[in-house]
Amino acid sequence: MLAARRMASTSSAKAAAAISAITSSLPTASSSSSITSPSAPLPLPASATHGALTFELLARCSTTRARASTLTLPHGPVQLPVFMPVATQASLKGLTPAQLADLTCRLCLNNTYHLGLKPGQAVLDAVGGAHNFQGWQHNLLTDSGGFQMVSLLQLATITEEGVRFLSPHDGKPMLLTPEHSIALQNSIGSDIAMQLDDVLVTTSPDAARMQAAMERSVRWLDRCIAAHKIPERQNLFCIIQGGLDVEMRRTCTHAMLERDTPGIAIGGLSGGEAKADYCRVVATVTELLPPLKPRYVMGIGYPEDLVVSVALGADMFDCVWPTRTARFGNAVTRTGMVNIKHQRYATDFGPIEDGCGCPCCRPADAKGAVNGVGDGTEKAGKLPDGRPRPAITRAFVHHNASKETVAAHLLTMHNVWYQLALMRSLREAILEDRFPARVREFFADLYPKGPVDYPDWAVDALAGVNLNLRE
Ligand SMILES: [Zn+2]
């Protein structure tokens, strides 16, 4: 916190000087190590408190860079690595906050852009923040709002001042500055706030614009730090930019680390780049990061991406995909996607996924089986084939898919549970130092034909951290 305040007082002049110092020393900047010591052996467990969080590193995989840790935020502890569901409008489509908590979620996302438009800052201030507004007792992370504007509003333009756009409500010109983004996030009261950054799609061929966006993101971080009014209750994360250029990513990483934020995000990815390029960027950045800060890769949610990114040393992820695809009738399972709308499920009385522990799939007589309702004394049911009758059958979801919102709600519950349970299983494997075996099991489940089907990008990225997937 003190460091953040000290930074705030020096602000943009220092930013400009630091960037010019770093960029002028390229390409040797990558060898600079005064601000990181990623390779220094650290006795575990080890913890550090910074801003409004405590990060406790519990275990490291002895083969890969995977880590297991506990991140304690103002609204309680979060077990890392973690997947964070996205509750865009302060609600996860179809789920109540109690249902989301029942799925073991302890940290989810809200979108600053949407909450800033509606209910708006005055309402958020009046109710005492987004936790109170949505009845959510656990942790929240908010984005800056910038990405939403640039991606949703075609007329958004970026200047040094901020992001200019036309209000979707009345067409009036508006401006989102780093200061305004932080003021909104202060009113939301999220446990983790993100800096406003200048985001370009990674596949942009304009290297000069990419460089300018990366440098502007550093300057905007200084403005965010200066504007942040509640660092003792809300953690501001920096966002490392630089597209697919690993030297630019290294430069940005060093500049961002000098600002000493409580947590660090890697941004701009998941924008259509090749998976091999994605992995190269994540691996490049995580190698430079200090061990006792959480690392968040933004916009990542496919199960394979999560597993590989954890192996590369990342801790936190978010994506709308698992909840969005549920609304199209898709269940995420360990053997891949299942579209329950398919006619073959009309008479399938099994669970959405065999062996899943979610409130839909677990046996109907399990305690608290259906959305927490039930006292565990329901009559145990059996399917005709002898299996326990699940709380919800595939046939029921199929029957309602495309007609009733309940099907989307049930699949959303299953999919969120799947993502959280996957991350929990990775964490347990890291704690017991059997992470490589868990990764092999994950790929074997997903690709029944075996290693011949494994994607090259995953095999190569894992080989880069000493894990031979085709062994
Ligand atoms: Zn399930």
Image (cartoon, rainbow, N blue to C red):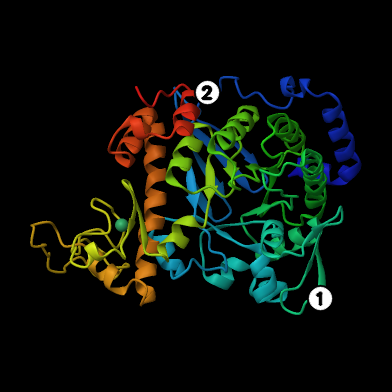
Give the structural element (helix, strand or loop) at label 1: loop
**Place of residue 10 in the rendered image (x, y in percent of width and height, measured from the top left):** 88, 42
Q: In the image, is 225 to the left or to the right of 92?
A: right
Please say whether residue 256 is visible from this viewpoint.
yes
Where is residue 343? Give x, y as percent. 25, 65
What is the x, y in percent for residue 260? 73, 38
Q: Residue furthest right?
A: 13
Q: Which residue is mark 2?
A: 43
- State the residue in front, 421 or 350: 350
Residue 433 appears in the picture as rendered: no
Q: Quadrant of residue 412?
A: bottom left
Which mark is drawn over residue 274? none
Q: Residues within 10 Å of mark 1 (few under 14, many from 20)?
A: few
Quarter holding the N terminus?
Answer: top right
* Residue kind at label 1, given as amino acid type: Lys
Q: Which mark is residue 172?
A: 1
